[in-house]
Amino acid sequence: MHPMFSDDMLEIVESFVIETQEMFEELDQDLLELESHSEDKELINKIFRAVHTVKGTSGFLEFTQMSELAHVFEDVLNKMRKEELKFKPEMLDVMLDAFDMMKALLEQVIEKTIREIDLGDIIARLEAIAAQQPAASVAAKATSPQQENAPASAAGKGKGAAPEPHPMFAEDMAEIVESFIVETEELFEQLDQDLLQLEQRADDKELINTIFRAVHTVKGTSGFLGFDQMSDLSHYFEDVLNKLRKEELLFQPWMMDIMLDALDTMKVLLQQAVHKEIKPINLETLLANLMNIAEGKKVQREKMAGEGASPHKGAAKTGPTPAPAAAPPRRKMDKTVDATIRVDVRRLDDLMNLVGELVLGRNRLAQIVSTFAMKDESQELSHELVDTSAQIDFITTELQAAVMKTRMVQIGRVFNRFPRLVRDIARESGKEIELVLEGEETEMDKSIIEEISDPLIHLIRNAADHGVESPGEREKKGKPRRGVIRLSAGHEGNHIVIMIEDDGRGIDPEKIKTKAVEKELISPEEAANLSLAEIYNLIFLPGFSTAQKVTNVSGRGVGMDVVKTNITRLNGMVSVESEVGKGTRLTLKLPLTLAIIQGLLVNVGAETFAVPLSSVIEVVKTHREEVSTIQGREVIRIRERILPLVRIHKLLEVPGAQSDPDRFYTVVIGVANHQFGLIVDDLQGQKEIVIKSLGTYLKNIPGIAGSTILGDGKVIMILDIGELTHLLQQHTAVED
């Protein structure tokens, strides 16, 4: 097993995976930006910093192939940012191939199966790019890595010359160094406590592992920053801790003085980074003491008497006194507060469940208070109870909103995958396509974000492959050679609206109808009676495709039905607008969250049901005379729309309902690309409802998504609109 997967390294590896995945999401977009902004020095620096970070972190985790590939990749980027190498478009293909290889290597870490893969070709291609700079430039800049990182005095500078700043303080490294300082300060705070705990709990193996991981992390991060003395000191410190955790060394109380000396010295060195003044200090005695501990030799610390709490006071005779070293040992350090914290999603789910229970309790309390107040409005106690209930109602609503926000994720995390996808499609098909992203900061519930990725991939692929024409075809039509696909997101009430637009050839209604009839998806008679919207909706039928040939992108007869299935499952809606020769727009309308929703309460016979309000378009009071029958199906006309009707009591076999009432309500439902009317006896109104699972035995009831508890304690069922759509289609097929 690779050493990075040992139990004591799991936390570090998990952090590495998460951070690297986040960097890779950014890199995907930044590398594509490079193609059109090759002169943007800040962009090149940003890409360099990301690859440099991956090189360092994978290096200290001994993930050799990732580190090696990132190192060669970094060389190319370093020469570009130093203007020793000019970017050429053909270089991007090599960079993207290298990036794909890095993704593949990261997958090995995620799957915990490290296998050697052949990097020879990609490394050779990267090295070939790096070698294309002018020879004169190479000669002028040629220095070894050791020379570049060495202090000015060691680099052959003339007497009196101003020392060069440490490479870690270069402008393009500022963000990385700042992050290093914040994280290391936090580690040191914890180390202060953990080392003192070790004195009392020397047999606590988990505590020793925690201390080891912290020092190991400092060693790695300071190493790849070129912060040599911090790296050396933590390396010796780590050796001691490693032997303690492997039980090759038995802890003894006198060792703690040396360990605390080591931590104090590391704090002093960190202050040099804070103040950007790296000055070598004398570590000889301290390193020797740590080495002796690791080798099991007794250290007579009394020899260090007079040095005070930190070993470097005596060392000042042989080396310069470090700047702000006067801070008392183990005093709480001035600290930059990190504004973010990572939380396991399962904890957020638990929190959401508790808030859901609180909402149910709030609703129940409001119902009881209302009943009590109506019986006796005169008593002071009644007024106080109403006021308290209102306060709890307000606090619960605010808490619910706060918890919902913790689950929100910017949709840009999904959007950022698509520039690469569009570029690859364009290159394969010989097209010129620009992808415009808007509203990436729009936030959605994490559970919905995960579900919309596949639908969006299919829609973007179809826009690029079927929608946008070839450059030659566009020129003949008087269009710019470069087509545009626009992907945007925004809020609309309690919904997220995502639009995918292209300025391509549009959808030809006649072609759609012809293809649907050819594939026997509809009959010629049905095709003749379809409205324009219904024709466009044919593209969502399983097996429908108008592609002239099968490519690696689309045209396999699958895709749009996947979109419909996923959007239906989310109780969302999708609509299509198109104009031949001008382009196509697909609009997805999705609920903000799936856990606590607004519901419309309806009565059917003796039962009350909740209909997710996100799927309700309108409610219409209806007379029996307004219902017509077309080919054996009940329909109703609402403002030029013919909608099929669903009688809930028949579909779900609800007892006590009238089979054919004179008057009823039609709840107009929109789900994915489909609309229909639900016939209900009466309306109760709108309520905020918490979706609760029906449990193992009842979870598979057709047409039911879950249950909720009303304020009076009554349990009611929540309709599964997507499933009802499916049942309606099955019911219609049986009648046919």
Image (cartoon, rainbow, N blue to C red):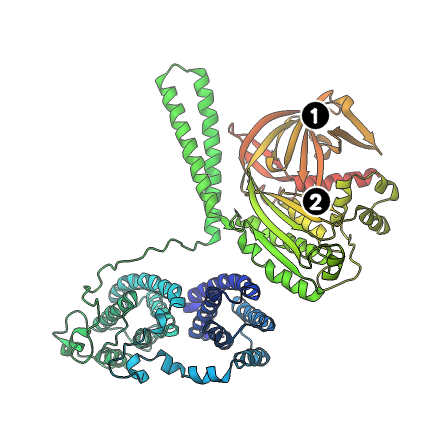
Q: Does residue 293 sit above or below 698 in this rendering?
A: below
**Disc 2 element:** strand
Tag of residue 576: 2
Image coords of residue 123 (percent x, y): 55, 79
Q: Quadrant of the C terminus?
A: top right
Q: Amino acid type of disc 2? A: Val
Which residue was labeled with disc 1? 657
Q: Residues within 10 Å of mark 1 (few under 14, many from 20)?
A: some
Residue at position x 77%, y 54% in the image: 545
Residue at position x 42%, y 81% in the image: 141
Image coords of residue 588 (percent x, y): 63, 45
Q: Residues within 10 Å of mark 2 (few under 14, many from 20)?
A: many
Q: CA distance from mark 1 to mark 2?
A: 37 Å
Q: Quadrant of residue 216?
A: bottom left
From this viewpoint, is residue 441 visible?
yes
Q: Quadrant of residue 571?
A: top right
Image coords of residue 586 (percent x, y): 67, 47
Q: Does residue 444 sit above or below 286 in this rendering?
A: above
Tag of residue 231: none
First along the sequence among labels 1 and 2: 2
**Disc 1 element:** loop
